[in-house]
Amino acid sequence: MDFTFAQRVKDLKGSAIRESFKALSRPGMISFAGGMPDPSTYPVEEINTIANEIFSETPITALQYGITEGYAPLIEQTRKRLSNAKIGSEDDSLIITSGGQQAIELITKALINEGDGIACEVPSFIGALNAFRSYNARLYSVPVEDDGMNIDILDKTLSENKNIKFIYTIPTFQNPSGITMSLEKRKQLLDVAKRHNVLILEDNPYGELRFAGKDVPTLKSLDNDGIVMYVGSYSKILAPGLRVGFLLAQKDIVEKAVVCKQVSDVHTGVLSQMIVSKYLEKYDINEQIKKSANLNGKKCALMLKFIDKYFPSDVSRTSPEGGLFLWCDLGRDIDSIEFAAKCVEKNVAIVSGASAMPDTSKKTSTFRLNFSMASEEKLELGIKTIGDVIRSYGR
Ligand SMILES: Cc1ncc(COP(=O)(O)O)c(C=O)c1O
């Protein structure tokens, strides 16, 4: 049977990260590739208790269709958590989504016509880049520096490309770089976006997972003009398999996202939403977050120590203050796709920086390491092995 794929998705490649999951089943494989919290932090007992309560007290609510906007108690609890962090105003609405990923897709579906532009950080999150590509958006690259996006380049890009509809940023503990945008740059970013009349999509799944340094306010909390659309998630602070995230944005944008979601999946699974809601009601999620962030911090420090011990000194790396990732640059003419494949041959999975590039035509010598998943014992062996692969290239 002959068929052709739609132009929109013809050139889309599967996420290298998802692909790497296949190699993970190999015995002895050490994974620095995933993007999930340490599984030991999942509140299994608590969720077991909650699920039993749901099925003995309100089973039909859990098994019945729900409303597209989300399970009402969870909407309220999420808004309360956000408002405690001064995120959002009365002009905003919130929709519960199937992970933050769906929120990003719904925004794209609602706002992007073929050929419209999106200004993206370099590097950026593959899941979002692919969502943008699947609507035939044009991606414009804005480099990320040690303190976040290069605002001058952003300004110039917006001046030269009037088709840009929004700026996509992960300002806190960025995936993949681990970098956090400074307060000064956040203010500049808001000014530039306002001046060019362009929306901002702030994606913040990791923001609460700080283990060092001082909090920096979210863009949304600094926004007085209704230009920031804010995406959050319970994936990295509770459990990713529940698939519960949210979009907080101007009412009319959320209204359109609701219609778009009806087309996609009608609503996010009610059982998952009820589990998150009951968890928020019965337990202290901030304790859970603190526990998880402390563990990540310990593992990050160990990974950095081993990187400094086993990697050649010309390999640069970031020093995250939270989140799940750090970012390395081999600093020489080595293609990181080939490099990542060599690491997998030696039983260590990493993510090539190539998958994080809005412009796929450019080669890169960068790669992402996740520090939350591997056990402490495997951290040293894994980093030492990567160091050996780097040295195998010679000087
Ligand atoms: C930056 C970023 N945004 C959004 C997501 C989507 O997460 P989820 O759909 O599990 O909420 C991820 C997941 O890795 C991410 O890293």
Image (tube, helix red, strand yellow):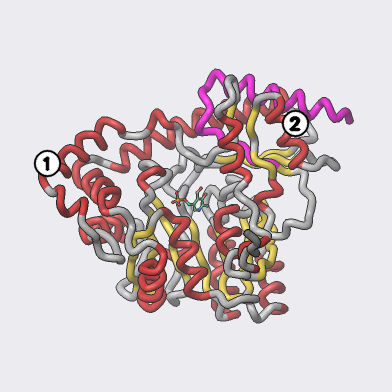
Q: Amino acid at mark 2?
A: Lys
Q: Residue furthest front?
A: 1
> Is residue 384 a member of the stretch shown in magenta?
yes
Q: Is mark 1 within 8 Å of ligand 1?
A: no
Rendering quarter of residue 326: top right
Instruction: Locate the N terminus by quadrant.
Output: bottom right
**What's the residue at 44%, 77% (across, down)?**
225
Q: Secondary structure at mark 2?
A: helix
Task: Pinpoint residue 306: horizontal percent, then vertical percent.
Answer: 65, 24
Residue with the mark numbered 1: 56
Does 151 sit left or right of 229 as displayed? right
Residue with the mark numbered 2: 342
- Disc 1: CA contacts within 10 A as few (<14), some (14-19) or many (>=20): few
The magenta stretch is 367-395
Rendering quarter of residue 194: bottom right
Q: Earlier in the sequence, mark 2 or mark 1?
A: 1
> Is residue 279 a member of the stretch shown in magenta?
no
Task: Pinpoint residue 296: horizontal percent, then vertical percent.
Answer: 48, 33
Q: Determine if residue 318 is in view.
A: no
Front-lying residue, 249 or 260: 260
